[in-house]
Image (tube, helix red, strand yellow):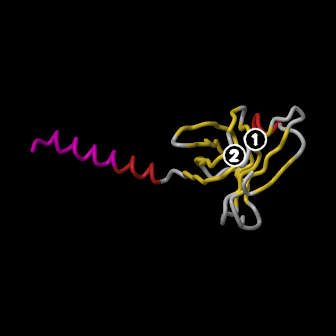
Amino acid sequence: MKPGIISKIILFSVFSAATIALGASNDFHKGSFQIGHSAQVNGQELKAGTYTVKWNGSGPDVEISIVSDGKVLATATAALVENNAKSSDDAVETSTTSDGVRTLKVIRFAGKKYSLEISGESAKAGSNKSSSGAN
């Protein structure tokens, strides 16, 4: 083998190893939740159903993506909040504005000591707070 080819192979190997190491260090998270009625996240409507929320990082502020059937339906900023105790089940909290728009505010995950508090446009929702495992 020629020295130029060997150096290219070595360089490619080092680059590949570094890429794999960086990918492994990503702090990627996801969880599932269910809502029993439609609600908005950052102006996007989510119909009643089961969703996956994905985020990267350990907070306190993270960008979340809400996904269904592999399609991103909504994105928003959320605070990753450490709770005192593990949640007994998956649960969501919603708020309803004075004009009747229900927004998703908090997502809790079964067996986890953290929750996501959604901010941004959805955080402007007003009064009537409701909480349930299947909201």
> Residue 101: x percent and y percent?
81, 35
From the viewer's perspective, is residue 11 above or below residue 88?
above
Q: Main secondary structure of the magenta part?
A: helix
> Residue 9: x percent and y percent?
22, 45
- Which image quarter: residue 4? top left
Residue name at image x 83 percent, y 36 percent: 124
Instruction: Name the kind of residue labelled 1 in the image.
Output: Ser
Pick whichever, 3 or 113, lies toward us: 113
From the viewer's perspective, is residue 133 above or below residue 119?
below
> Residue 111: x percent and y percent?
66, 66
- Looking at the rendered structure, the secondary structure element under dot 2 is strand
> Which disc is residue 77 wearing?
none
Of circles 2 and 1, the one toward us is 1
Q: What span is colored magenta in the figure?
A: 1-16
> Which disc is residue 61 wearing?
2
Residue 98 lies left or right of residue 108; in this view the side is: right
The residue tagged 1 is 119
- Which image quarter: residue 1? top left
Whole-Å distance between the Cαs marked 2 and 1?
A: 9 Å
Q: Does residue 133 show up magenta in the picture? A: no
Instruction: Name the kind of residue labelled 2 in the image.
Output: Asp
Residue name at image x 45 percent, y 49 percent: 22
| Mark earlier in primary sequence (2, 1) | 2
Residue name at image x 61 percent, y 47 percent: 51
Pick whichever, 93 or 14, lies toward us: 93
Mark 2 in CB contact with mark 1 (< 8 angstroms): yes
Pick whichever, 46 or 14, lies toward us: 46
